Amino acid sequence: MRRFIGCYCIILIVTAITGLFLESRQEYAQERILWNIKNDFRKINNPASIENEFIVKRILDRYQNFLRHYPKSELIPRAKLLLAKTLISQDNYSEARAILEEITENYKYNVEIVAQALYGIAQSQESENNWPKAVTIYRSIIREYPLTTTGFSIPYYLGNFYRSRGLNSTALSAFNEAAEFYQNIAENYPDSPLGFTSLKMAVKCQLAQGHWTDAFFGSRQIFLQYPVAVSLLETIQMIRDISIKKLNNPGLAISTYNDFLNRNPGHPINDTLKKIINNLQPQNNKPSNQNK
Amino acid sequence: MTDSKKKRLLPWGHFLNRNPFGLLRASLHTICQNPVILFPTASLAFIQLFILEILYFSPQYPLAYFFGPLIRSVWSEEYLHYPQNLMLLPKIFYYAQIIIYLLIGSMLLALSSKIVAILNEHPKVNIKVAFAETMRLYVHIFCASLISYILFQVFANSYAHLVEIIIKLKPFGKTMSFWDKTLLWTVPYFQFLSGILASTLIVYVIPIIVHEKKKIFSALIENFKILLHTFPTTLLIVGLPTLLYLPILALRNNIPILMDTLGPEVQIIVIIIGLFVTMGIDLMIIVSATTLYLFVKENS
């Protein structure tokens, strides 16, 4: 028996050593190094404070070491991005921008990375209170990279950007622009995850503007067009909230739910929907609502 | 020499009153005195650890050629990268463990039971012969493990469904209350108790198949007959060792906190600790159940 157990141990150890040896020569090991540096940085409470200066300097050194050790790695642009973000947190904007501009020049084939680099530049301008420059860059990202994760999120970000600065009328027009942007994407990519997310973003923008009727019809479109979406319950809740609390018309929610039931017989959510309709019916039968 | 006068090699005297603590102590003694009983468990642990290594290295060359497209299509590309692959590892390993348990694990546990039965008669065990004899009963052993698995799933899922129904009964739009959250929190612990109950209900099936060479249905009937007289003792000999799994359950419930403080690799450590604890528990249960079964048989 001892012989067998010895064999088992040898097989396990040899497999582990071979696997770890192969791992050390692959991108996976580099992913782990980068993730660990990023995670160590995340754990620092206030990276800009003087007491954390030495710790942040070590983080920066680790990024530099990574760039030196793996010059041919596919993760180099990502490492540079993270290095630049760390520099921005240290208020070292010029050095960060130099790295980010180098990314936009040298890695044009990777649109997501370029969009993120441009976003980093805009963030650094924003941190230096250079709003016009930041907004110009944000708009260029929307124009040139609308379908990247970064480019897609910026129109909504811009609305919040103005609102957080108390520029309410500019914020409203930014949200309006953003809603149009997302609706255009939703029209160009119907019945796709991108189309679905675009509609959701459009509704978010309409809610931010207080355009309740538009938000209701947007939610209705999401609900009827994407019956298999994971966030179906969330949409049901939104339709219910907007029609009752904002439009004071439960009938709108009821008719939407009924349309769903007619279009999707046998859908697992139907029983829940029927219960919701029954709960809403007394509210809808109130005279004030019948007049509507 | 008649059966009743045979020299007993196992320490029967410790638990003549069907004392579960005495029985467990005697089983532990039996395992320590006869390390050969550990052989099937060690083999099972080896198989599981080997599979765990394969799954851990699956996103990397050369295994990525096979596993890459599979993980990409079932989950997504991000699970091939660090640290998301470590989030997926417990899930994939759990599926692998079910297959290993059904196809190999039950067979090796049956071999442990066979070894205990042989040790009761002879001081020496020929593993090859014991393995060959157990292998002949493979179909029935497989069926027994399948029934055990289905029973566990039925018990465990029925509670989870019940909790789901209770939570769904609330008016739509209301957030989860403290009681709802508490109910949800109890699900893994109830599943733990379901595991104990499911194991208890058919714990003698494998010893009966191995020892009496009965088919699955007659073994099931015989199992319930024995259980009728020994249920409290059996529940305790299954339940007490299984309690050792509670700390693992607590570790698994707090894995996000552990991962944040110790790193994503802690997943692997928890899996390995859980694996050894499970192996130990299964071994204790099968040895205790076989011992009690032999004792009941000899005294009936």
Image: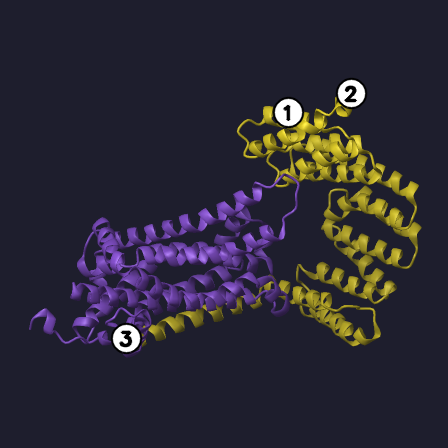
Asked if residue B46 shows in the view, the reply is no
- Horizontal side, residue A1 vs residue B179: left or right: left
The residue that appears at 63% across and 39% down in the rendered structure is B172
Asked if both marks, 2 and 3, belong to the same chain, the answer given is no
Within 10 Å of disc 2 (Cα), the crowding (few <14, some 14-19, many 20+) is few
**Element type where label 1 sits in the image:** helix
Which residue position is annotated with label 2? A291
Q: Amino acid at mark 3?
A: Thr
Asked if both marks, 3 and 1, belong to the same chain, the answer given is no
Residues at marks 2 and 1 touching, judged by CB atoms closer than 8 Å: no
- The image's colouring method is by chain
Image quadrant assignment for residue B19: bottom left
- Residue A259: mark: 1
Picture coordinates of residue A89 (x, y %)? 82, 64
Q: Is residue B87 above or below residue A144?
A: below
Q: Amino acid at mark 1?
A: Asp
On-image quarter of the N terminus of chain B? bottom left
